[in-house]
Amino acid sequence: MGKSRRNRTKGGQRSDPIAKPVKPPSDPELAAIREKTILPVLKDLQSAEPKSRTVAAGAIANIIQDTKCRKLLLREKVVQIVLNETLTDTSLESRAAGWEILRVLTAEEEADFCVHLYRVDVLTAIQYASAKITTTLTSSSPAFSKITKAEQNYVWNIADSLTSILAALAEAQDEALDAAVRNQEIVRFLFTLITNDSTTAPVLNSALSCMITLSEDNQQFVEAILADDATKCYKQLIAFKDGDGYKAVLACGVLHNIFSMAQWNDQTTGEDGACDAALVPTLSRTLEHTKLKRDMTNGHNSTSSAEILQLALEILASIGTSLQETLEKGSRGKGAEREEIEDKDVAMDAGDGEQLSDNDSAGEDEEMDQDEMEADMDMVTGADDHENEFESFDDLPTLKELMQKAIPRVMKLCQTQSNSDEISDLIRSHALTTLNNISWTVSCIDFTEGSSAAILRGWTPVAKTIWKQAIAPVLSSDTSDVGLATIVTSLAWAIARTLHGEQFLCGEEHKKFISLYHASKNLNPDQDDPFQSLGVKCIGVLGQVALAAPIPLNREIGIFLLTVVKALPETPAADTVEALNQLFDIYGDENEKWDKEVFWKDNFLQYLEEVVPKVKAMLKTVDKRKSTELRARAEEASLNLSRFIQYKQKHRP
């Protein structure tokens, strides 16, 4: 699912964050707060007088929102007091305040606090409270509607806190997530909240949000939802999805996770045709009818328009990515043929380690016959092809819904406002990410196959509109926002991959990408994945633009790509690899007009021959143990460079 979550921690390195010896803070202001506020209220929290405990619990639930008070309360071991005393208090009001205290702490503190809370066995307390609430809601003696309004409010407050705490624990640690979904009382509690007619809107939203977190990549919880005959939770989720408002969006989030884990997609749908295609209309309506307001939430129970839009966009973005799996499954008919080709490629690459030495590669390639060289060129220039056999949009209802209903709504959110602020910029970023995910999935379809013609006809005008209305305006604004530039460049790369042979530039966007590339040299490289850097994405866009460009523009981009490689060793390895791959794609076909007019007239072959030693030297700088993928792709690019040169030498015009 697209909903962001904190990184889960696995280990047990951190000590108990509240077990340090308590001593007065050295800061005079904090010391005064401790003496006047914190110590008295904690004393009352442990009072023998029930009323004093209740008042103190409520007071702490309020002051703990303040950062200074919260840190002081943690120093004074408030968590131990709440777990051991407040949550077992005879007063329902005190227990509600105790759970609220823990809710605020899990929301405001770092993930390691949630890990600590799990380790001190908070799930046992959650299980007990969950079972008690389930009994209260489902009991007929007395019926929930017959208890006092005050008691009902306390029950809902506890339920709201429990669902928020559960979500925070699950986000923080896999072990806590697994333990929660294995607990039958907790699962039944969530299902009861979802299906009970009396559940208040804030609690329902909190429960649905919790279920999004618990159902993400979690087979056990998804199976529990689908197997639930007692409350029929799944049917209720479908009903919510067919409605409107925030709960409809939340329900779509849970259902998307269910469909993903159950592998219900366009090719193998679930009950009543269940797949992501059924979610897109609801999410698209939400984008259309939710007007972005420059507001923030007022308390955790309220939801802003920005939060609604953000979640809807995140789910659509995740659907766009998940669609790739459907495309891959749809191409299994040619699986045997693909495996045979891949087996040949593996055999050809078997001796790569030796071929990368300074003396070996040329000698072996010189003995390749014509058929082998052409087979090599197919491999060099066709590494990114994705076969598929879809006859029309009817085979891909999710893609059809995304293109016809979602993308037009998302596009409107991408448009720059003259009075844009932080909130509107955030929504625009999520909208661009959604377009990016969908576009990359479409770009993996092999449009050279005639069976994909219908999809290409439908996608081409959409892609051109995205370029004109979402990409070009950002480029023309000369944004200094690196994050925005990176996502727009990634989107442009995906769009350009689908528009070969089409004229889609609105002006001189290629110059903007060249400028962005040079500007990216001053940025810190992405240590986790250098191929996701802004520089690599600029190179990728430009290479694809060259495939649809007139001769002068093709020449300009070709020279730029050569310059990137020639700048070794200053050029990063990932940039070099991408520049070489784009050059192979652009000039690998001697039938293209720019082969003769650009590659040969401007003597590109000589420049490529000159950079071979630099590329081999670059390989030695990449540690295969620390950068396994980078080294592998660099080795492949180096090998393909030798093959490319050999091929072009034999195919002079």
Image (cartoon, rainbow, N blue to C red):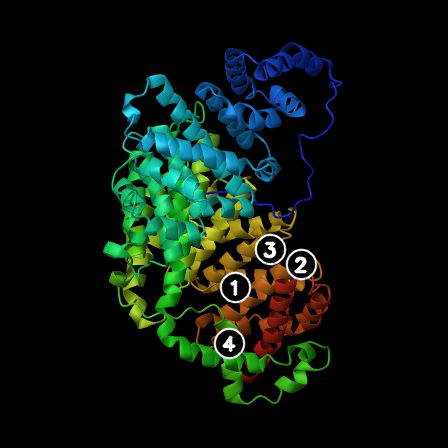
Residue designated by label 2: 571
Residue 443: image location, x then y, percent: 41, 61
CA distance for labels 4 and 1:
24 Å
Q: Earlier in the sequence, mark 4 or mark 2?
A: 4
Q: Earlier in the sequence, mark 4 or mark 1?
A: 4
Local secondary structure at mark 2: loop
State how far apart marks 2 and 3 are (Cα).
Answer: 16 Å
How busy is the neighbourhood of tag 4: few (under 14 within 10 Å), some, or many (20 plus)? some
**Relative image position of residue 554 (x, y in whole percent):** 49, 63
Q: Residue furthest front?
A: 141
Q: Earlier in the sequence, mark 4 or mark 3?
A: 4
Q: Disc 4 to disc 2, how far (Cα)?
A: 25 Å
**Residue 367 picture location, percent across and down:** 61, 90
Query: Looking at the rendering, which quadrant does residue 261 occupy?
Result: bottom left
Disc 2 residue type?
Thr
Mark 4 or mark 1: which is in front?
4
Checking the image for residue 555, the label placed there is 1
In the picture, measured across the screen, residue 16 lies left or right of residue 229, that is right
